[in-house]
Image (cartoon, rainbow, N blue to C red):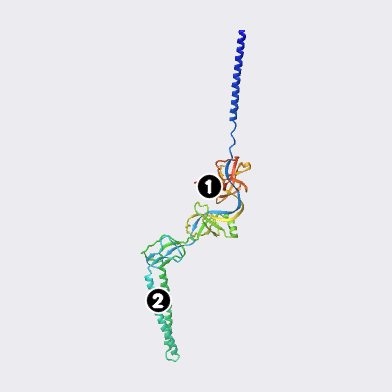
Amino acid sequence: MATDGRTLTKRLGVAAAFCAVAAIALGLFYRGGETGRAADPPPAMPALPVPVTRVVEKTVPIYLEYVGTTDAIRTVTLQAQVTGYLLKQLVPDGSDVSAGQLLYQIDPRSYQAALDQAKAQAQKDQAALEYAMASHHRNAVMSKNGDVSIDTLQQSESAEHQDTAALAADRAAIETAQLNLDYTRIVAPFAGRLSLSLVHEGALITVAGTQLNNLVQLDPIYATFNPPDTDLPQIQNSQAAAPIEADVMVGDDKTPQYHGKLTFLDNSVGRSTGTITARATIENPDHTLLPGQFIRVRLHISDRPDALLVPQIAVSSSQIGEYVFVVGKNNKLEQHFVTLGANYGPLVAVTKGVASGESVVVGNLLKVGPGMTVKPVPAAATVQAAGSQGGG
């Protein structure tokens, strides 16, 4: 009986151990299940909002652009034609002057005196002529009755002719004296801008032809440039239809500030350069363009209808070429390599790579890539939201 008791006790111990192992296994099973649920993939990230704008289709101008220089239409050296002391310089150096404005005054007193003397001599000779005419008339009447000899009549006639010639010489002397007096006043022959004065008040101008200053016309002004002969047919065809509009840009300016028209094409092409000299007349009312400046001249040759335009900020570059991101099917981004044309303000023409009406990405370009799903947002709405947030 004792043996049976020990056997029963062993069996009960084995059963208890089995139950404990089962409990541990069951606990591990449940823990493993919880661990498996925590390892499930996280929920998908929301699509990145990106500002987009549609490809614009419109008529755009076609331009030819060249590098050129500005030239004054008229340049003149102001010179003295009479001698004398420079009495006064009426306008400062570098001034803008109008046509006919008095610039320099040479001492006029000696020339005024010469004019007065010539006028007095003319009055004297006028009186002598009047007496000679009366004497000749009287002798002519008296000669009919034989009271005056033929010789006396001829002498009176000769005196009348001499006094008439003397009066004519006096009038010429008056005109010369008046011209010399006028030459003491140096006036602007046209509107323009003065340079530095070469003489100063009090200087004695001893030689006729002394240079006083230089005057250049600034409005309008010439823009001179040299198109290659390969562009000549386009320019000539456009000029035959209507005057060609010309725009001028200075430095890094993208928007032209000066406007005019093409007014001159030379009659031959340079053999060594293959270019032709052309010139546009440009309005310069503010006198901000000066002769000798380097400029860019843009000729409006024609218009291109149905051109495709995208914002310049939408275009990115790589080693392969320039490209834009286009929102495709299911809002997935497509990378389109493009061929660009001319710039039109913030837009650029695209000759290959996009179609009318497609949406191109204009923001968050560093965060997107081909095949990425995005949430398109109109660019105008994006700008408005940014403005409402008070960016600065």
User: Which numbered disc covers residue 208?
Assistant: none
**Is label 2 in a helix, a strand or a loop?**
helix
Q: Amino acid at mark 1?
A: Ser
Instruction: From the top left corner, tell me how far across and down residue 139 is, in percent.
Output: 43, 88
Residue density around tag 2, few if under 14, some if 14–19, many if 20 or more, within 10 Å: some
Query: What's the residue at 57%, 43% (across, down)?
Result: 50
Q: How many marks?
A: 2
Disc 1 versus disc 2: distance between alpha carbons?
A: 85 Å
Query: What's the residue at 37%, 70% (across, down)?
Result: 109
Query: Quadrant location of the N terminus?
Result: top right
Instruction: From the top left corner, tell me how far across and down residue 96 is, in percent.
Output: 44, 61
User: Can the viewer see residue 265 in this picture?
Assistant: no
Front position in the image: 190 or 159: 190
Instruction: From the top left corner, tell me how far across and down residue 276 is, in percent.
Output: 54, 56
User: Can the viewer see residue 133 in this picture?
Assistant: yes
The quadrant holding residue 169 is bottom left
Front position in the image: 257 or 26: 26
The quadrant holding residue 262 is bottom right
User: Which numbered disc covers residue 119?
Assistant: 2
Q: Amino acid at mark 2?
A: Lys
Which residue is under mark 1? Answer: 388
Instruction: Note whether 242 is above or below 375 in the view shown.
Output: below
